[in-house]
Image (cartoon, rainbow, N blue to C red):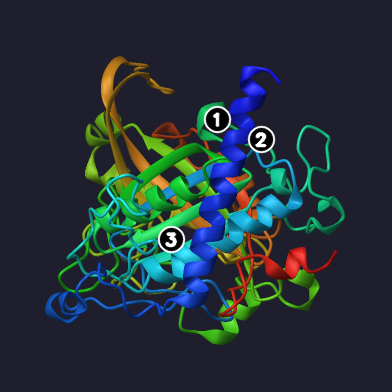
Amino acid sequence: MNESDDLRLRGRRRFLASAATVAVVAATAPVAATAHARASSASSETGSDSEPFFGTHQAGVATTPQTNVYFAAFDLIAEKRDDVIALLRAWTAASARLTQGQTADLLTNDPATPELDSYETTGLATDRLTLTFGFGPGMFTKDGKDRYGLAKHRPDALADLPRFNGDQLVPERTGGDLCIQACADNPQVAFHAVRQLTRIAYGAANIRWAQSGFMAAQKDKSTPRNLMGFKDGSMNVPIRAEAAMNQYIWAGDEGGWMQHGTYMVARPIRIALEHWDRMKLSFQQQVMGREKHSGAPLGQKHENDSLALDANDANGNPIIPENAHVRLGAPENNDGAQILRRSYSYDNGLSYIAERWPPWHQGMEFDAGLLFISYQRDPRTGFVKIFDKMSKFDMMNQFVTHVGGGVFACPPGAKEGGFIGQPLFDLA
């Protein structure tokens, strides 16, 4: 056995031991009690509360959006199907604890062994933490290999995204066999959850790319604004409308093992903020097709007014330009297609960047933008249908660049005693 094989074997043994520990603890220890749990009173004191982990659907989709996200994609290195199941069981057990304000595992208090939680959220509220899991195409087939005997169960809806006009996808920020979306009203709580799940995955999956994000909570609870200063998500599927969610977001009978699940498209989109900030307000509003201050569609008064797609000005020109962002994304122009946007702004500091459009400035600029996350019943009739047109004609393209991302099948919610994705693995 060479050194690399030895390291791989030791990593797998460590992962299996960790997974077994988490699973046993989940089965034997009540989630509501542990000596090192975060104080339950903190939740009531801050107005926060816990979101349920188990249920028909995964949390974090139809949940009222929290103010922070930490998104991470992983590459599976597990060699056996049982190892993948062990990982998902361990992640499920730890997630059930974390979302209820517990540590990822019971702590040992043994100074001779590593603790099974990094402990940096002790004393914090749960801050409505949700953990949403997705399976990428590599779960089913990778490099032409059916690694886990799952290829025949890959849903048709989990189709590889086409390359869109203007894409500049960086391999290190693209793809993934698994993903975790952690959302919370405290960035430390969201990051802590992904950190613990990454630790648990040691020897079975390696983190591939990650992106944190934030969403400014509006004092009047109105639609939050993105870094371009416009309200983001005005034209969204209402999460409390069951019929609309069933029609556009949740997989139905056609989904098989994915019934009650959904499909996620995640894409970090860099925004040329310096370029955008030099534009006149009137031009910015033409690009968006909305008033910047009120959020109302051009020609209307209120944010939620219908788009005046047929209205013309005194010169006979459309009030909402033909290549405005909202017009190209409107259901009326996409055969009724709708998606649930759940996006967050991000700021990665500065990078040396070459702008895509005149004046083609090159230099240190903000590496900031939007972590676009959308959910839909089928990406082919959701995101792909809408974005194909946008990628070619949207005026906003001169300010934004898609730099990575992936598509994931988010299975239905786990049942107590079960694990995320169990309907898939029960098939064979």
Q: Residue at x 67, y 52 (%)?
A: 84
Q: In this orientation, which residue lies closer to the viewer: 244 or 276?
A: 244
x, y percent for residue 177: 64, 45
Query: Which percent across, then down, holds residue 47?
Result: 18, 79
Q: Residue furthest left?
A: 45
Task: Check the image and report above or below for 265 versus 76.
Answer: below
State which tag comes first along the sequence, 3 or 1: 1
Tell me the distance, in whole angstroms, between the alpha carbons under discs 3 and 2.
22 Å
Q: Indicate which disc residue 350 carries.
A: none
Label 1 secondary element:
loop
Name which residue type carries label 2. Arg
Residue at the spot of label 2: 163
Viewer can see residue 260 = yes
Residue 414 occupies quadrant? bottom right
Looking at the picture, tell me which residue is in the foreground, 115 or 68. 115
- Horizontal side of 225 relative to 204 (left or right) equals left
Spot occupied by residue 48 in the image (x, y as percentages of width and height): 23, 76
Q: Mark 3 or mark 2: name the one nearer the start of the chain.
A: 2
For discs 2 and 1, the disc positioned in front in the rendered view: 1
Residue that numbered label 3 is attached to: 342
Q: Quarter of the image containing the C terminus?
A: bottom right
Q: Which residue has dot 1 on it?
A: 169
Residue closer to the observer: 318 or 18: 18
- Which of these two is toward me, 196 or 67? 196
